[in-house]
Image (spheres, grey):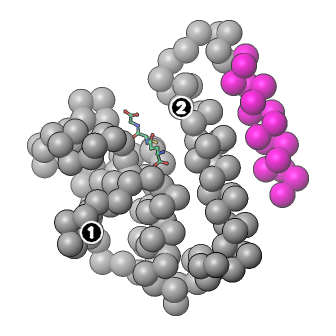
Amino acid sequence: MKLYYTLGACSLAAHIVLLEAGYAFDLEKVDLKVKRTESGKDFNKISEKSTVPLLLLNNNQTVSEVSVIIQYLADQKPESGLAPELGSFERVRLNEWLNFIAAEVHKSFYPFFAGMVSTQKTVILRSWAAIFHILRAS
Ligand SMILES: N[C@@H](CCC(=O)N[C@@H](CS)C(=O)NCC(=O)O)C(=O)O
């Protein structure tokens, strides 16, 4: 199993779950600016989305999307206790948080790394206020 990752990126979540669940795995760093892996491969050919994290399984299937990867890893090792049982209401709560983070939190931070004009910043800072209100209340 191999995790394609980038330092300082959301692939850290998958890396943490791999470690916490006790997996044996390889890591390969990706330079997202030029879409090249540290062993010199063209990342666009490995990942159709060209984003990290990407998990390469031992059967050569790949899994993308942070929330899908970490739930897959947790479900393969239920003894890790990292995710509530599938179908349980606690699992619904986990999915609510993972979806909120993916859809509202993660993507709203992206423009700050990509560069943007100040009017965009104002709009995004307003959305952050709502996001942090929800996070503080939980
Ligand atoms: N929806 C994806 C988003 C993944 C994503 O955007 N990852 C960023 C790093 S945090 C990335 O690879 N960006 C590269 C790019 O957009 O070119 C997920 O949840 O995994």
Q: Looking at the image, which residue is at 17% across and 43% down?
A: 45
Residue 121 rendering spot, x and y as whole percentages: 66, 17
Label 1 or label 2, whichever lies nearer to me, is 1
**Mark 1: secondary structure:** loop
Magenta stretch contains residue 3: no
Residue 13 visible here? no
Q: Is residue 135 above or below residue 80?
A: above
Q: Nearer the viewer, residue 8 or 101?
A: 101
**In the rendered structure, which amino acid carries the disc numbered 1?**
Leu
Magenta stretch contains residue 134: yes
Q: Which residues are magenta?
A: 122-138
Per the rendering, the mark at residue 57 is 1
Look at mark 2 in the image and give the residue it sits on.
110
Q: Earlier in the sequence, mark 1 or mark 2?
A: 1
Q: Nearer the viewer, residue 33 or 67?
A: 67
By secondary structure, the bulk of the magenta-drawn segment is best described as helix
Ligand 1 within 8 Å of the CB at mark 2 = yes
